[in-house]
Image (tube, rainbow, N blue to C red):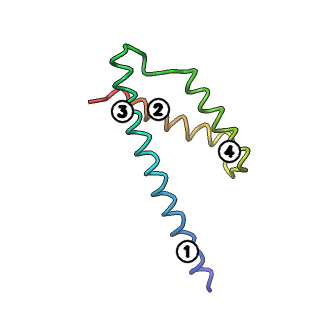
């Protein structure tokens, strides 16, 4: 097998993972929409800094335990963006 073939196979694997990530984001967004509705109904704030800090610390711990190749800083940046975008879904809740 040539290096080009191996690269193409690996790229196909990455593409599959990208689809899985998107599927997870879709599920996360659906839950966020429901959470936003409940928060609105109960008069709660959308932003829960304690929860966000817990998520960040928890995911960094999981990343370390699973020997994730991404740095802690990278994981935190990625999840901060995910949480920021998720907040927008919670706020929108049309």
Give the crowd class for mark 4: few <14, some 14-19, many >=20 residues within 10 Å.
some
Location of mark 2 (residue): 84
Dot 4 or dot 1, earlier in sequence: 1
Q: Residue furthest bottom?
A: 1
Q: Secondary structure at mark 4?
A: helix
Residue 29, image quadrant: top left
Q: Residue at x 71, y 49 (%)?
A: 66
Residues at badges 4 and 1 in contact (C-beta under 8 Å)?
no
Above or below, 94 against 15 in this view is: above
- Label 3 to label 1: alpha-carbon separation: 36 Å
Q: Nearer the viewer, mark 2 or mark 4?
A: 4
Residue 66 to residue 55: above or below: below
- Compared with 76, 15 (above or below) is below
Q: How far across and how far down the image is residue 73, in percent?
A: 66, 39
How far is disc 2 from disc 1 in space, using C-alphas?
A: 34 Å
Q: Is residue 53 left or right of residue 31?
A: right
Q: Nearer the viewer, mark 2 or mark 3?
A: 3
Q: Which residue is tagged 3?
A: 33
Q: Earlier in the sequence, mark 2 or mark 1?
A: 1
| Left or right of 77 in this view: 29 | left
Dots 2 and 4: beta carbons under 8 Å? no
Q: Quadrant of the N terminus?
A: bottom right
Image quadrant occupied by the C terminus: top left
Q: Choose the circle earlier in sequence order: 2 or 4.
A: 4
Where residue 75 appears, x then y in whole percent? 62, 42
Q: Which residue is mark 1?
A: 9
Distance from Cα at disc 4 to Cα at disc 1? 25 Å
Q: Position of residue 24 (x, y in %)?
A: 46, 48
Q: Tags 3 and 4 in contact by the CB under 8 Å rule?
A: no
The residue located at (47%, 32%) in the rendering is: 84
Q: Residue furthest left?
A: 94
């Amino acid at each position: 097998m040539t290096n080009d073939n191996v690269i193409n196979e690996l790229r196909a694997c990455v593409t599959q993972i990208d689809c899985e990530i998107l599927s997870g984001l879709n599920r996360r967004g659906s839950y966020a929409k429901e959470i936003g509705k409940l928060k609105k109904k109960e008069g709660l704030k959308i932003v829960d800094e304690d929860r966000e800090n817990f998520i960040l610390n928890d995911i960094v711990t999981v990343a370390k335990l699973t020997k994730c190749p991404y740095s802690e800083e990278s994981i935190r940046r990625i999840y901060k963006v995910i949480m920021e975008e998720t907040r927008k879904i919670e706020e929108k809740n049309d």
